[in-house]
Image: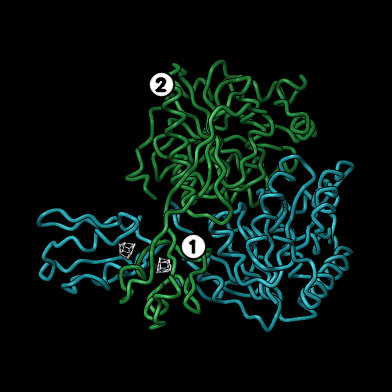
């Protein structure tokens, strides 16, 4: 089962949720944690995994063979991302704009284009105290996160429990990370920003046919707004974590909640059971 | 004209709350919300919308069922696994057009996509340019480039000498797009291990694109030891810490009331924000603009 942990707003506690959920389940099942927030991966800071392998993520970009090219301009014409320009006697490529679609090399009538890998990030894997760990890291200065996210997701093994830590927002990196999940857990906080971005995250989930549930983090006296919204939309609130200095300090020091306060483990196991029920019964899908 | 962009790497460090206060403290400026994915600035600034525009960019492949002979070539060649059972999955298609070019019977067309909307609004503090990228859309970088350009045009036309941009989280394409060519970046971090880690990465992006950064530690008292680490790190990198703001519930309250904190109350936190703004303002004069990114057609 694949559970994506997402949120529209950043900093609501996705990584806290994902890591504590993984650690609470490791005695019950084979657990993988995939950190797909490849722009700012943080789960390793809480899990301290022993890294056992790493592999660069490469994007296939065109390389022009001068002797074969007759400057016909076909490649520049088919590239949707303006990553190739042909001027008389010269072909310019802009590898940072290339999406690696392969159209130019396939369609070049002279067979003058081959592909070479350009490193855009790295994927690392290992183990943290019984939790299988994988994360990706986009190289600084690189714009496109999708190839790195795809590579991380290739590690998912549906036979166990797979927890995917998703980047904030609602655009393509989020969609890529959530794609293929069986459940989407949305983490929010009871502020105006939290609610605004939860509404956006719910419309993102609506694009998929997966059940979802909400976790309210830093809950306090002002949860009414979020609660009313969830009730109106028929989205269950599966867990509430209070606004608590002790919890905030644990996180700031990189200590997972269920390690610092083991009594929380029980709540995370309950949360997982609720998710399991919803997935099996097929409830909790939000109406389009 | 100067442009300040406020970034954080990690989300939720309090970037937008600070930008709202800067909006109130600066005397005359154009505001620009570059977090086109999950824009929040309008919640505090309560703008009146003046203009609304559609944002068309990119394409999506469509297979015409009655023309398709199910040869399977497109399915085999699409690198993004976007075609299954002779249908295109809109969420996976990157609009590259490979399938369109190779289909032997011309059954595939490429359709332009409405990827979002952008707006020009009025706030009490000046014009606000903001946007809403459609759910699950690509091209956030392009939309950011577009609204920044609009903000610049407005500033030129109406003689504003400052643009304040609220940047998106992360380090990928919308962040690069928010940063390129700005005069100064303010990076708002928090004293958590994640905050420190993400700070280093976003500073790397600033360096990469040649924009000088200032650093602000928000909620510094949540973990003073980590705050010291950030200060030491910045010192070793010759970076200026422009301010340290305490954890304060008043932020949440001011957001709920739709008023920037500096106008909602006057306490120690407000004075800290005021001196932070003073330092930013002085630095804006000193720094030259960063390099223009090679291309904004991302
Ligand atoms: S692989 Fe695709 S995106 Fe890259 S240069 Fe060739 S046509 Fe353009
Ligand atoms: S346009 Fe490109 S990404 Fe979209 S379906 Fe065709 S080959 Fe795949």
Write the residue at 56% across / 21% down: B126
SS at badge 2: helix
Q: Which color scheme did the rendering employ for the protein?
A: by chain
Q: Which chain is green?
A: B
Q: Quadrant of residue A76?
A: bottom left
Split into 4 quadrants, where in the image is the N terminus of chain A?
Answer: bottom right
Residue A44 can be seen, yes or no: no
According to the image, label 2 marks what residue?
A: B156
What numbered label is drawn on residue A146? 1
Picture coordinates of residue A32 (x, y %)? Answer: 66, 75
Q: Nearer the viewer, mark 1 or mark 2?
A: 2
Quadrant field for ligand 1: bottom left
Q: Quadrant of residue B42?
A: top right
- Chain letter for the residue marked with disc 2 in the picture: B
Q: Which chain is cyan?
A: A
Q: Is residue A103 shown left or right of residue A207?
A: left
Write the residue at 10% across / 69% down: A67
Write the residue at 80% across / 80% down: A28
Nearer the observer, A77 or B147 = A77
Q: Residues within 10 Å of mark 1 (few under 14, many from 20)?
A: some
Split into 4 quadrants, where in the image is the C terminus of chain A?
Answer: bottom right
SS at badge 1: helix
């Amino acid at each position: 089962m694949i559970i994506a942990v997402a949120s529209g707003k950043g900093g609501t506690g996705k990584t806290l949720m994902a890591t504590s959920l993984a650690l609470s389940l490791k005695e019950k099942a084979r657990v993988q944690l995939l950190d797909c927030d490849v722009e700012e991966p943080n789960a390793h800071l809480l899990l301290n995994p022993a890294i056992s392998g790493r592999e660069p993520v490469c994007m296939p970009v065109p390389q022009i063979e001068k002797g074969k090219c007759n400057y016909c301009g076909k490649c520049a014409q088919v590239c949707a991302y303006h990553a190739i320009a042909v001027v008389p006697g010269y072909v310019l490529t802009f590898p940072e704009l290339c999406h690696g679609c392969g159209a130019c090399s396939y369609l070049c009538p002279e067979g003058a284009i081959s592909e070479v890998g350009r490193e855009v990030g790295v994927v690392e894997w290992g183990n943290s105290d019984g939790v299988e760990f994988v994360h990706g890291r986009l190289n600084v200065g690189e714009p496109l996160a999708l190839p790195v996210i795809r590579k991380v997701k290739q590690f998912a093994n549906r036979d166990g429990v797979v927890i995917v830590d998703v980047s904030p927002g609602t655009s393509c990196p989020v969609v890529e990370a959530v794609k293929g999940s069986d459940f989407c857990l949305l983490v929010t906080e009871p502020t105006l920003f939290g609610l605004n971005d939860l509404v956006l995250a719910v419309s993102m989930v609506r694009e998929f046919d997966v059940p979802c549930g909400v976790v309210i983090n830093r809950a306090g006296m002002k949860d009414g707004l979020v609660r009313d919204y969830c009730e109106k939309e028929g989205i269950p609130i599966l867990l509430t974590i209070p606004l608590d200095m002790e919890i905030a300090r644990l996180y700031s020091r990189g200590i997972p909640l269920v390690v610092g306060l083991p009594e929380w483990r029980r709540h995370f196991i309950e949360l997982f059971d609720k998710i399991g029920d919803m997935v099996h019964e097929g409830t909790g899908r939000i109406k389009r | 004209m100067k442009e300040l962009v406020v970034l954080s790497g990690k989300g939720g460090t309090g970037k937008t709350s600070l930008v709202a206060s800067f909006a109130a403290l600066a005397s005359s400026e154009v505001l620009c919300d570059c977090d086109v994915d999950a824009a929040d600035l309008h919640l505090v600034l309560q703008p009146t919308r003046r203009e609304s525009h559609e944002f068309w960019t990119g394409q999506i492949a469509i297979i015409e069922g009655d023309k398709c002979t199910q040869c399977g070539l497109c399915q085999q060649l699409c690198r993004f696994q976007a075609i299954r059972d002779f249908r295109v999955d809109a969420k996976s298609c990157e609009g590259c057009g490979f399938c369109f070019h190779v289909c032997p019977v011309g059954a595939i067309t490429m359709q332009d996509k409405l990827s979002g909307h952008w707006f020009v609004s009025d706030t009490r503090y000046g014009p606000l340019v903001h946007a809403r990228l459609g759910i699950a859309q690509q091209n956030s970088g392009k939309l950011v480039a577009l609204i920044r350009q609009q903000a610049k045009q407005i500033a030129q036309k109406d003689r504003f000498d400052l643009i304040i941009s609220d940047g998106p989280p992360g380090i990928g394409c919308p962040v690069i797009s928010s940063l390129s060519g700005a005069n100064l970046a303010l990076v708002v971090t928090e004293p958590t291990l994640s905050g420190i880690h993400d700070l280093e990465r976003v500073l790397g992006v600033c360096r990469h694109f040649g924009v000088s950064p200032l650093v602000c530690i928000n909620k510094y008292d949540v973990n003073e030891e980590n705050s010291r680490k950030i200060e030491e790190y910045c010192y070793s990198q010759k970076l200026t810490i422009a301010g340290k703001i305490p954890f304060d519930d008043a932020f949440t309250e001011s957001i709920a009331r739709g008023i920037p904190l500096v106008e909602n109350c006057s306490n120690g936190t407000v004075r800290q924000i005021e001196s932070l703004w003073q330092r930013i303002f002085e630095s804006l004069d000193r720094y030259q603009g960063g390099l223009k990114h090679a291309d904004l057609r991302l």
